[in-house]
Image (spheres, rainbow, N blue to C red):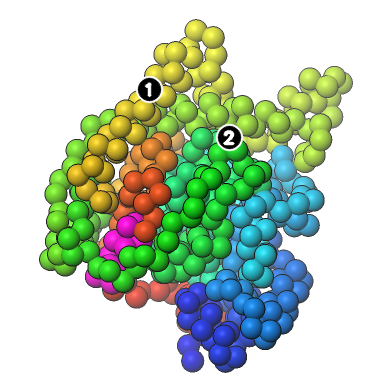
């Protein structure tokens, strides 16, 4: 048997069901792997060995009783912006250092309900603001393919642990691409579901109209398994979708013959990395050869999506982060007055990127500028939604690169916010529209770094999204693994 830590969720579930392995053995395998990789990666902020061991023991009892679900006994990691009862939750920020929540967020509690095993909390860009996981107050996370490079962000820790084998899957959050972009840079699968399909209750808010929890996994089918466990209406989230959850498996093995695939013209740009463009075009040709009806589609407003996003998201962040004031929990820096205490707490508790976005958002919402900036950005968002809706009248899915480049060097873009923001140029439009999108690894560039391919679908179109993604996965036959996911590293 290969190393248990390298199995897919579906393969591990089969072994658990047959009694060939146990949840405790799966946990031991990922903890052993983390013991090897964490000194290189710093992908976890907290590993809850005791809590995970108790969960694994409960899962083994449940499986022995014949009452296991597909996620029962599977070790999974959580991005550290998800409220987790009894485990420090920091958003990678000093302002929440030491905060231990008294409750679980809904996505976390749904995993616990089926006795999935939560291994620990993963590093992220502070308050999910970033594309490289360099903005964490607790140190940089490294890419398991090349530790001189970033894993992407903001869910970089989650993507890194899945790629490295120190978790079978992880939850991330995607506000502008923060699940898909790191998945692409780490050579794994990353899904942003339809907005509202997964409850945001217990997800510490960045931009509430954009945030969505999604899985990072090593296969498309594994993404389905995790989504099945966490999707569905939640009375604790007013934006939660109230209808029936779609059958995510409906087209998993259907192939793409007859499927209408639109190539998003505005998301294939000449300034992208040549290997990324070449791999994307090759996959489009493969889809055509597999029977898909491929056509080019124009989404004119996408040209302005990046600018609109970086007004809308900071504006919502400036309101959401007002609650972190040193009064109730987290960091408190004393001052002579309450106002001085709050000002000092926020100045010392927030990092530079968070402060930059709070200032940008507050300015965009201020009197005299609201209509010119925030209001105009919302009008662009409406145009983006209309362009996507019009496109989906003629195609079933849209495709593009996930990221304009493969993983870049640590520090390469950290002093250039505009260059960093451009990392999300392909992913942001789906957050503005609220539609689902997925990244699937399709190859390596000349430096041996993974390339991600993005599939987008209309709202609640996860079944057709998974149909296309599963075929892309088959066509790409991507089996490469980073060196840090093998026994070569000691």
Q: Main secondary structure of the magenta part?
A: helix
Q: Is residue 113 left or right of residue 135?
A: right
Instruction: Say above or below: 435 vs 248.
Output: above
x, y (%) of residue 334?
84, 29
Are circles 1 and 2 on residues that touch, CB within 8 Å? no
Q: Is residue 465 left or right of residue 47?
A: left
For the residues labelled 1 and 2, the Cα–Cα distance comes to 25 Å
Name the residue carrying label 1. Answer: 379
Q: Is residue 128 left or right of residue 405?
A: right
**Numbered range of the magenta stretch:** 464-475
Q: Is residue 159 visible?
A: no
> Which residue is drawn at the image coordinates 59% and 67% (left, top)?
76
> Which residue is drawn at the image coordinates 36% and 39% (left, top)?
429
Q: Specify few, some or many for label 2: CA neighbours under 10 Å numbering under 14, 14-19, or 20 or more.
A: many
> Which residue is drawn at the image coordinates 57% and 49% (left, top)?
233
471 is within the stretch colored magenta: yes
x, y (%) of residue 31?
63, 75
Name the residue carrying label 2. Answer: 354
Instruction: Say above or below: 46 vs 139.
Output: below
């Amino acid at each position: 048997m290969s190393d248990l830590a390298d199995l897919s969720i579906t393969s591990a579930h089969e072994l658990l069901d047959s009694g060939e392995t146990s949840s405790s053995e799966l946990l031991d395998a990922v903890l052993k792997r983390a013991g090897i990789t964490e000194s290189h990666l710093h992908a976890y902020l907290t590993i809850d060995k005791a809590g995970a061991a108790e969960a694994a023991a409960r899962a083994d009892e449940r499986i022995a009783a014949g009452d296991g679900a597909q996620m029962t006994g599977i070790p999974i990691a959580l991005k550290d912006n998800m409220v987790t009862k009894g485990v420090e939750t920091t958003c990678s920020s000093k302002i929440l250092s030491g905060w231990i929540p008294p409750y679980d967020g809904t996505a976390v509690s749904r995993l616990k309900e089926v006795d999935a095993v939560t291994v620990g909390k993963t590093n992220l860009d502070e308050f999910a603001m970033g594309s490289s996981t360099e903005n964490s107050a607790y140190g940089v996370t490294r890419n398991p393919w090349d530790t001189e490079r970033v894993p992407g962000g903001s869910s970089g820790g989650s993507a890194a642990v899945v790629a490295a084998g120190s978790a079978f899957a992880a939850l991330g959050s995607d506000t502008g691409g923060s699940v898909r972009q790191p998945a692409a840079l780490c050579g794994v699968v990353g899904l942003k579901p339809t907005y509202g399909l997964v409850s945001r209750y217990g997800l510490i808010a960045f931009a509430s109209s954009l945030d969505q929890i999604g899985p990072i996994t090593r296969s498309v089918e594994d993404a389905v398994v995790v989504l099945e466990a966490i999707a569905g209406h939640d009375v604790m989230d007013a934006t939660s979708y109230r209808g029936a959850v779609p059958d995510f498996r409906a087209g998993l093995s259907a192939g793409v013959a007859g499927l209408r695939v639109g190539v998003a013209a505005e998301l294939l740009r000449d300034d992208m990395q040549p290997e990324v463009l070449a791999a994307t075009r090759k996959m489009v040709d493969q889809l055509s050869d597999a029977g898909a009806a491929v056509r080019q589609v124009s989404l004119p407003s996408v040209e302005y999506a990046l600018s609109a996003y970086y007004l809308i998201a900071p504006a919502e962040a400036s309101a959401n982060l007002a609650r972190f004031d040193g009064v109730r929990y987290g960091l408190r820096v004393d001052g002579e007055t309450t106002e001085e205490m709050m000002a000092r707490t926020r100045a010392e508790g927030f990092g530079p990127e968070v402060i930059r976005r709070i200032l940008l958002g507050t300015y965009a919402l201020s009197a005299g500028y609201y209509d010119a900036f925030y209001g105009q950005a919302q009008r662009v968002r409406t145009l983006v939604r209309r362009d996507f809706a019009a496109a989906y009248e003629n195609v079933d899915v849209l495709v593009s690169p996930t990221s304009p480049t493969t993983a870049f060097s640590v520090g390469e873009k950290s002093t250039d916010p505009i260059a960093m923001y451009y990392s999300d140029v392909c992913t942001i439009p789906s957050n503005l529209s609220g539609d689902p999108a997925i990244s699937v690894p399709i190859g390596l560039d000349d430096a041996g770094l993974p390339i991600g391919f993005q599939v987008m679908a209309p709202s609640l179109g996860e079944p057709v999204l998974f149909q296309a993604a599963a075929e892309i996965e088959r066509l790409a036959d991507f089996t490469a693994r980073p060196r840090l996911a093998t026994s070569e590293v000691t």
